[in-house]
Image (cartoon, rainbow, N blue to C red):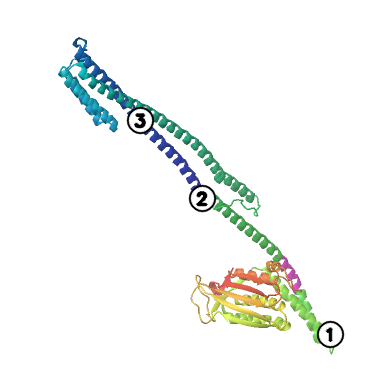
Amino acid sequence: MTIRWKLNTAFIALVLVFLVAAGITIHAVRLTAEQTRSHVRTRELAQYAANIRTLVFAQVAAAADPRRLPPETAEADWAATALDDIDVNIRLAEGERERRQWTGVRAGIVALAAALDADRPAAETAPIVRTIEQRLRDLHQLYEISQYDAAVAIARSSFHAQVAIGVAAALTVLLLLVYLSMIRRWLIRPVDVLRASVETIGHGDLAHRVPLAGRDELAVLARGIDGMAAGLAAHQAELVRAREFSAIGEMCANIAHGLRNPLAAIRSGAQLAARRANGSATVRESFDDLAAQADVMDQRISRLFLFSRPLELRATSVSFVDLAASAHAQARNVLTTRDVRLTIDDATNGRGWCIDAERVAEAVAELIMNAAHHSPPQSEVRVHGAADIDGAVSSAPDTSCPEPGGPGTLRIEVIDRGAGMSPATCAKAFDTFFTTRPGGTGMGLALVRKLAKKHGGTVSIESQPNAGTTITLTLRELPQIKAGHATA
């Protein structure tokens, strides 16, 4: 859930509270207005019923004693005026009871007016007057009850409006507090954590990780910062390693330069002494062994020179079979000494590969010799080549390298069934000067990794104790450069 979604949800909840409170208040105000209108109407009708009652008694009194008739009621059309108003009340009556009572009052007034016009005695008009009076009292009582109900409804609506406004105010304050708390929890606090973590990482602690979890924007940003810190740590380690390699390379170059000339003199002297050892096979064998050891030392010095110098690649086209044959020739002495046979498995369909064939052959030979040293006698080391092609596959080696844009990847696997390696050994196998073999220099696999990187590839190890080892070398083809040379 993103922070924007959370804040929008809280804001929508706040708006909904306002809308609900506004709706309840508007409804209460509308009910209050309706009940107020009903209250005013019933009050006016109650007063009108009282006026009709007064008018009826005035007409009866006037009929009995014309001298007591008030001037305003002496008109002859009093009944017609009253009947017009009563007809209006009958049409606007809100209930059957009200309509029935006003209809009865109208009939009584008509009868009373007729009796008064005929000058009937009071004994005949008295029942009509009592009937009219009773109906008017019922109407007055009905209107009083309606007024009371309207007053109660007005009070209730007002109370509901006040409660709605109070609840809305309380919920608004509560939601504002919750909203501020959410902002603090989802925004301010994570930003503080990010700021502190960035300061920590900026001070050089690249192992620090931002302690933010989740799937919101700041958590994604935290993971991005962690990735950047990890990348910086890796680059820093690479720079340190490069500085170490530079220092080691310079030292190796100085040592190699200082040892090569004395070794050449020792080898020449041993060879000369071996030729002059007349008839003494033991002495000649000793000098020959001394010359051979000088050659071994010279090879190690050559590796020191190779390790100390920048690696320059020469792009040539070669098939995997020819590459494996060259590596086999270089590793034949070790294979023969260890009584290990080599099997070459070609799955590249004879395609030509634009790589530094000489150096790759040396690297594969190094892997074969390592496998032979860790394999039991009469076992097998298998070299498997496979192709991951980005373009068309040629069925025969080419004489030229491909143009940039469509190179393939050559995958070489050197597989043995030896003692294998532990995970700790696998993790250190490519470290410079790390070796588990007596007499090893610890530079072979380091040079293989260096060559793989120069080819844009990788080298990896899969091994388990007592289950053998598989070293996989992947090489990207080199683009065609002037005069067939490429420098990394």
Query: Relative to residue 54, is residue 433 depicted above or below?
Result: below
Q: Tell me the quarter of the picture where residue 302 sits.
A: bottom right
Q: Report the Cα–Cα distance between label 2 and label 1.
A: 85 Å
Under mark 2, the amino acid is Thr
On the question of residue 247 being in view, the answer is yes
Q: Nearer the viewer, residue 473 or 29?
A: 29
Looking at the rendered image, the disc whose residue lies closer to the viewer, 2 or 1, is 2
Q: Residue at x 15, y 18 (%)?
A: 117
* Residue receiving disc 2: 2
Looking at the rendered image, the disc whose residue lies closer to the viewer, 3 or 2, is 3
Earlier along the polypeptide chain: callout 2 or callout 1?
A: 2
Q: Which mark is residue 35?
A: 3
Q: Is residue 19 left or right of residue 270?
A: left
Q: Nearer the viewer, residue 414 or 271?
A: 414
Q: Is residue 374 left or right of residue 192?
A: right
* Residue receiving disc 1: 283
Under mark 1, the amino acid is Val
Q: Is residue 272 left or right of residue 124?
A: right
**What are the residue bounds of the magenta stretch?**
250-260
Q: Where residue 228 appears, x then y in whole percent?
A: 59, 55
The kind of secondary structure element at disc 1 is helix
Q: Where residue 266 appears, x then y in whole percent?
A: 79, 78
Q: Nearer the viewer, residue 405 or 142?
A: 142
Q: Tell me the quarter of the picture where residue 267 sits.
A: bottom right
Q: Tell me the quarter of the picture where residue 319 sits.
A: bottom right
Earlier along the polypeptide chain: callout 3 or callout 2?
A: 2
Q: Where residue 130 appears, x then y in whole percent?
A: 26, 21
Task: Name the chief secondary structure element in magenta.
Answer: helix
